[in-house]
Image (tube, rainbow, N blue to C red):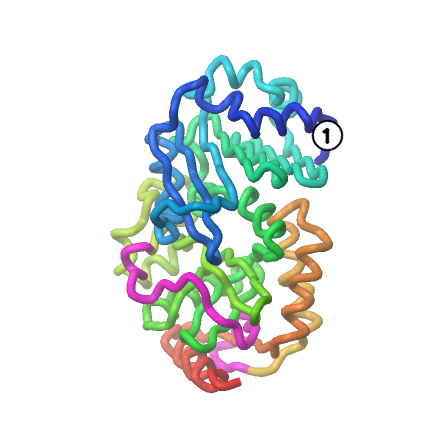
C-alpha cells in the first residue's frame, strides 16, 4: 500500500543521519563489493552485525574511494529518542499493522509489519537506512536476504535488476535457474554447488546485461525445507535456526561450505526452469513466453515497486538467451549430471 508522507523530511534525515545513532559513531563499519561497486555499511550495534553479515560475508572487501551507497543500520535501542522524533513517527503509529510502500523518484521506502523492518533509500544522496525494532527477533527470511529492498532499488539505479532466481554453472557458461516456490530451484542450485558447479545464488541474484548477460551474487544463504535438509546432512552445521516454528524453513549460511565454488559473477548462456517430474530427469527446450511470465510475476511480487524497469530487464534477458525446462528426478545426482553436461555443452555458445 502507498500512503501519504513528507518525502523531503525523510531525505534530509538520510543525508544527515539525523536519527541514526543520536550523535554517536557506529560500532563498526564494513564494505561490500557488488559488480565492482562499493557499499558502506554503518552498524549501530553488534546485534545488527550478527543478523546481517552472515548472508553477505562473501562480499566483504577493503575500503576504497568512490562509494556507491552508504547504508546506516540501526534499531530502537540505539535510535531511542531520535527515532521517536524522526519524520516517520506518525507513519509508524498509523501503519503498525500494514505494509507501507512509497516510491517517489529517487526516494523509496518500505515497511514490513511482520519483521518491523524499515528500508529507506535516497538514490540522489546515495544514502539508505535499514531499521528494525529488534534485530535479534527479525524473521529467518529477513536474515536470509537482508537489505533486499535497499539493494533492489540501488541495483535498478545501476541499470541492473535484482531477480527471484538462482545461478550456477561453469566459469565460462552458467544458467539462470527460475521457478515457482516448491519447484526445486533452490534445491537444484544447492545440490549443484555441493557437486562442484560454481554458485552465485539460489534465491536472489542480480542481472547485468553489459558487456553480456551475467548474474551477480548477493547472498550466500538459503531457506531449505526439512526433506531437503535431511538429505544433505553436510549442511546441518551451517543451519542458523536450529529451533524453528512449525512451517519455518531452515536458514542455512553457505559461506564456509561453498567457499571453493562461490563466484561473484557467472556469465549466463541459458535460462533453465525447474519443475518436478514424474520420475524421469530430462532437459528440454521450453516456451519462453510461459517461463518469462512465471519469472516476471514472482520477481515483481517479491520486489514491490519494481514494475516497468524490472520487467524490461527480464524481457531483454529472455530475448537474448534460450529457455529450457529441467524436469527433476527424485534422485538429484541425475539432475545435476544433466545440468553439468548442459553447461559444458553451451560453454562455447
Residue 279 sits inside the magenta stretch: yes
Residue 93 sits inside the magenta stretch: no
> Which of the 4 quarters of the picture holds residue 99?
top right
Give whichever of 116, 28 is nearer the camera.
Answer: 28
Which residue shows up at 72% across the image and 34% down it?
2
Which residue shows up at 45% across the image and 38% down it?
139
| Percent x, y of residue 208 | 56, 63
| Percent x, y of residue 323 | 61, 76
| Percent x, y of residue 324 | 58, 77
> Which of the 4 quarters of the picture holds residue 134?
top left
Give whichever of 214, 339 is nearer the camera.
Answer: 214
Query: According to the image, label 1 marks what residue?
Result: 3
Which residue shows up at 73% across the image and 54% down it?
308
Magenta extent: 255-283
> Which of the 4 quarters of the picture holds residue 14?
top right
Q: Is residue 51 above or below residue 80?
A: below
Amino acid at each position: 500500500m502507498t500512503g501519504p508522507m513528507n518525502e523531503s523530511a525523510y531525505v534530509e534525515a538520510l543525508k544527515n543521519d539525523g536519527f541514526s545513532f543520536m550523535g554517536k559513531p557506529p560500532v563498526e563499519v564494513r564494505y561490500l563489493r557488488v559488480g565492482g561497486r562499493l557499499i558502506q555499511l554503518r552498524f549501530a550495534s553488534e546485534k545488527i552485525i550478527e543478523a546481517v553479515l552472515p548472508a553477505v560475508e562473501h562480499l566483504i572487501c577493503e575500503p576504497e574511494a568512490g562509494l556507491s551507497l552508504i547504508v546506516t543500520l540501526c534499531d530502537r535501542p540505539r535510535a531511542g529518542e531520535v527515532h521517536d522524533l524522526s519524520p516517520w513517527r506518525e507513519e509508524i503509529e498509523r501503519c503498525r499493522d500494514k505494509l507501507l510502500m512509497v516510491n517517489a523518484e529517487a526516494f523509496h521506502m518500505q515497511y514490513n509489519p511482520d519483521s518491523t523492518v524499515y528500508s529507506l533509500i535516497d538514490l540522489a544522496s546515495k544514502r539508505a537506512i535499514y531499521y528494525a525494532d529488534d534485530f535479534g527477533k527479525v524473521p529467518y527470511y529477513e536474515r536470509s536476504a537482508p537489505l533486499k529492498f535497499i539493494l533492489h532499488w540501488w541495483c535498478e539505479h545501476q541499470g541492473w535488476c535484482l531477480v527471484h532466481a538462482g545461478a550456477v554453472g561453469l566459469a565460462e557458461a552458467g544458467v539462470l535457474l527460475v521457478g515457482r516456490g516448491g519447484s526445486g530451484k533452490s534445491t537444484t542450485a544447492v545440490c549443484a554447488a555441493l557437486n562442484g558447479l560454481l554458485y552465485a545464488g539460489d534465491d536472489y541474484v542480480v542481472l547485468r546485461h553489459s558487456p553480456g548477460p551475467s548474474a551477480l551474487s548477493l547472498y550466500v544463504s538459503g531457506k531449505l525445507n526439512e526433506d531437503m535438509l535431511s538429505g544433505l546432512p553436510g549442511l546441518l552445521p551451517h543451519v542458523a535456526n536450529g529451533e524453528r516454528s512449525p512451517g519455518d524453513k531452515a536458514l542455512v549460511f553457505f559461506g564456509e561450505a561453498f567457499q571453493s565454488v562461490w563466484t561473484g559473477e557467472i556469465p549466463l548462456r541459458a535460462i533453465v526452469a525447474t519443475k518436478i517430474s514424474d520420475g524421469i530427469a530430462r532437459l528440454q527446450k521450453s516456451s519462453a513466453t510461459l517461463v518469462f511470465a512465471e519469472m516476471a510475476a514472482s520477481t515483481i511480487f517479491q520486489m514491490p515497486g519494481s514494475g516497468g524497469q524490472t520487467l524490461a530487464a527480464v524481457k531483454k534477458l529472455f530475448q537474448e538467451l534460450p529457455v529450457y525446462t529441467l524436469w527433476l528426478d527424485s534422485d538429484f545426482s541425475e539432475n545435476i549430471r544433466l545440468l553439468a553436461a548442459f553447461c559444458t555443452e553451451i560453454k562455447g555458445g
